[in-house]
Amino acid sequence: MNNNKNILITGGNRGIGKGLVKRLCLSHNVIFSVRTEQLGQKTLDSLNDKNAKFIVMDVDHLESVKEAISSLKSLVDHIDILYNNAGILISGLDNNETALNTDEESIISTFNTNTLGVLRVTKFVEPLMKPGSRIINISSGMGQLEDMQDGHTAYRLSKTALNALTVILSKELAFKNISVNTICPGWVQTDMGGPSATLTVDESTREIVKFSLKDKFPTGKYLRHGEVIPW
Ligand SMILES: NC(=O)c1ccc[n+]([C@@H]2O[C@H](COP(=O)([O-])OP(=O)(O)OC[C@H]3O[C@@H](n4cnc5c(N)ncnc54)[C@H](OP(=O)(O)O)[C@@H]3O)[C@@H](O)[C@H]2O)c1
């Protein structure tokens, strides 16, 4: 893919999202989302780069997404790549509660952010996408059915459902030649991944960016470090 693409990254103020912003704004027009104006400005100041702008969006709320997309339209007339990155892991990696002990509220709110949030954003961004555009859903190995383990029920369910959503969207948007893939970023040193994670943000985002800018790009696949993995 050439330079100067218009790229939208959700949850760009910290962790993997910020890593993607930092890397991609070197040669592309990056718009990232944040939940407050202050966070957006702070992130922008730390980037020290003019190829990045931000919009305020909480993916949990439809009205917020609608407002954010109208701000987005005042910045760009189309989006070439959408990274659905914003996500939550409510209980944290230390709290490995069982399915039977997980309260429904945490399942519903995790689903609202990690799964429905992606659908909400995609619904309003897709009309801004031309044929050849790409959607990358940042999922997790914890949603992989082939390697499903116990614990972290809310998070696992939300990411397995996100993987299903990826396949559904890849089929539904094929007529418009929009590719939709899921990426597992690996275990990454962020607030969510914790300090013991095996990859730095820099290492993980290098692989994600390398894959997402490839000339030949698949659709309806689940990938980790550029390799297709089983669902
Ligand atoms: N780190 C890992 O090891 C790992 C592994 C597999 C998959 N992932 C996935 O990678 C993605 C990024 O994770 P991370 O490790 O970078 O997490 P992180 O450091 O906790 O950052 C999460 C980002 O998502 C944003 N966000 C959360 N809820 C949101 C909402 N309702 N609306 C808008 N933005 C929201 C946060 O914004 P605020 O600052 O406002 O909260 C923040 O920018 C997630 O989808 C995660 O599930 C991470």
Image (cartoon, grey):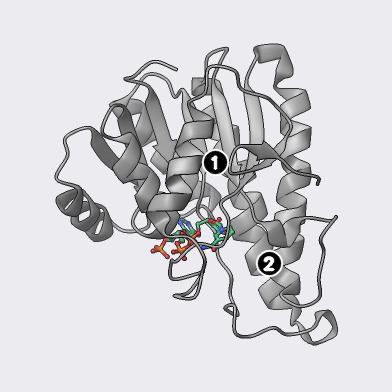
Residue 121 is tagged as 1
Q: Nearer the viewer, residue 166 or 123?
A: 166
Residue 155 is tagged as 2
Q: Amino acid at mark 2?
A: Tyr
Q: Secondary structure at mark 1?
A: helix
Q: Amino acid at mark 1?
A: Val
Q: Secondary structure at mark 2?
A: helix
Contact between labelled residues 1 and 2, with CB atoms less than 8 Å apart: no
Residue 167 is tagged as none
* Figure quadrant of residue 71: top left
Disc 2 residue: CB within 8 Å of ligand 1:
yes
As displayed, is residue 174 above or below residue 107? above
Disc on the earlier residue, 2 or 1: 1
Spot occupied by residue 119 in the image (x, y as percentages of width and height): 64, 42
Q: Nearer the viewer, residue 170 or 71?
A: 170
Q: CA distance from mark 2 to mark 1?
A: 19 Å
Which residue occupies 42% across, 36% down?
8
Which residue occupies 67% across, 24% down?
218
Which residue occupies 71% across, 62% down?
142
As displayed, is residue 7 above or below residue 38? above
Q: Quadrant of the N terminus?
A: top left
